[in-house]
Amino acid sequence: MEYGLIGGALGHSYSKLIHEQLCGYPYELCPLPAEADARAFLRARAFKAVNVTIPYKRLALECCDEADPRAAAIGAVNTLVNRGGRLFGYNTDYDGFSYLARAHGVDFGGRTVLVLGTGGTSRTVTAAAKAGGAKEVLYASRAGGPGTLDYSRAAARQEVQVVVNTSPAGMYPEVESCLLDPAAFPQLEAVLDVVYNPFKTELVQRAGELGVTAAGGLEMLVAQAVYAARLFTGQEIPEKCIDPVFRSIWADRANIVLVGMPSSGKTTIGRMLAKALDKRFVDLDAEIERASGQSVPSIFETQGEAGFRRWEQRVTGRFAKESGQVLSCGGGVVKTAANVRALRRNGVVLFIDRPVEKLRVGGSRPLSTDREALERMAAQRGPLYRAAADITVDNSGEPFARAAAAAKEAICAYFGIERP
């Protein structure tokens, strides 16, 4: 292996995509489940340079012949460069986290910072926060301990102004995990989460709902990759590369979630978008039928709407945690708040807005059996669609291809990328 990433589990890493887009060199993912495997890999030194992730950043420091002073002070190495058989260790997570904070205007100066988790990344964040002038850095973990709060005691520290999650909480596949509620901190200004899969952890979503500056870890991942690639290649890769690569990866891996009334065009437009954007198309109603072994009308008949909503929430949660999809949702998906939260973790929600007079009545749609029922439904659901949506696309005309083209333009503008 020339270049790559080592860690305990790497099934959903974006590092290969990022490095190959940045520099074009082949980049391999090398999962090493046991510490003995990692030690053997590092002893063999059969690589030019590697990144290191959980849980081997301390081990990487131990195996270095020479460590950068900042990495040594932090006590964690995430970048190893093999120069003539000697391993040189660096911590580009520090630079990546500092970039993330700058990109979102997070100021540590004079602030009380609460760091969730006590692993290698927490020390990296601490170093960056202190360099930024933090007044105090507090630590929290599940068990607490000397110098560390448990999460219930941490939630009582109302002076906290910045929260940074460095733990795996909220990471795929346990995406609903959240160690504490940001609403506990009345002076809270910002929440940063180093987790990048999903794009918006539960912690980030809750902070955003409070109007607090909040960001996940994908920008940090791309930034640290740029700084690591400089060390890998000896080339001066400019910081201006970070934002376009971040946006490209985000756009490539994000779900596009289509919501709207029954017969508004979600399935037709969704298939067009999936083809145009090279994403997998998923019809969630069809997946509900597959999972339940019943048609949607049959579920309504035998289990009622409540039974259908339970199936809908279960299936929505399963597909929402994956990435790179166009998801066509049933018309009532927004009636369940948990569905909207799940869909927004990895997705951009697009509301297909079609005038009620152009919607079809009946068919396989149990709740829109007549025009009057359809109009009542549109009045009830319209505000929910608009509240959930990141993008709204008008589909009042024909053919639906026009709305699909408008949706594609709007999606590219949302991500800040050029139209494919």
Image (cartoon, grey):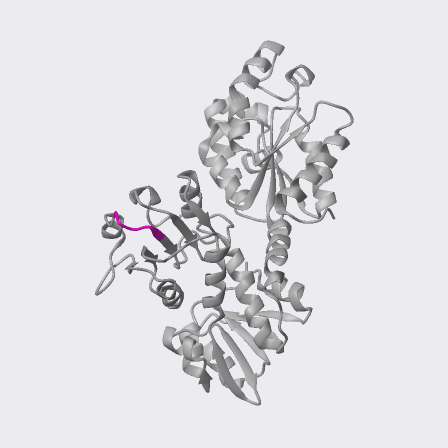
Question: Per the image, is 82 magenta?
Answer: no
Give the farthest residue toward the bottom: 84
Instruction: Give x and y (percent) for residue 125.
Output: 39, 63
Q: Main secondary structure of the magenta part?
A: loop
Q: Residue at x 67, y 44 (%)?
A: 412
Quadrant of residue 50 within the rendered picture: bottom right
Instruction: Give x and y (percent) for residue 274.
Output: 70, 42
Write down the region rendered in magenta. Answer: 158-162
Q: Residue at x 52, y 40 (%)?
A: 343
Q: Residue at x 63, y 56 (%)?
A: 244
Question: Per the image, is 161 magenta?
Answer: yes
Instruction: Give x and y (percent) for residue 36.
Output: 44, 78
How many marks are shown on the rendered structure? 0
Residue 176 visible? The answer is no
Q: Is residue 212 above or below residue 69?
A: above
Q: Which is more toward the observer, 418 or 102? A: 102
Residue 226 visible? The answer is yes
Q: Quadrant of the N terminus?
A: bottom right
Give the farthest residue toward the top: 372
397 displayed left or right of 369: right
Q: Which is more toward the observer, 221 or 46? A: 221
Q: Which is more toward the observer, 363 or 99? A: 99
Q: Is residue 130 above or below residue 358?
A: below
Q: Which is more toward the observer, 97 or 314? A: 97
Instruction: Give x and y (percent) for residue 403.
Output: 72, 31
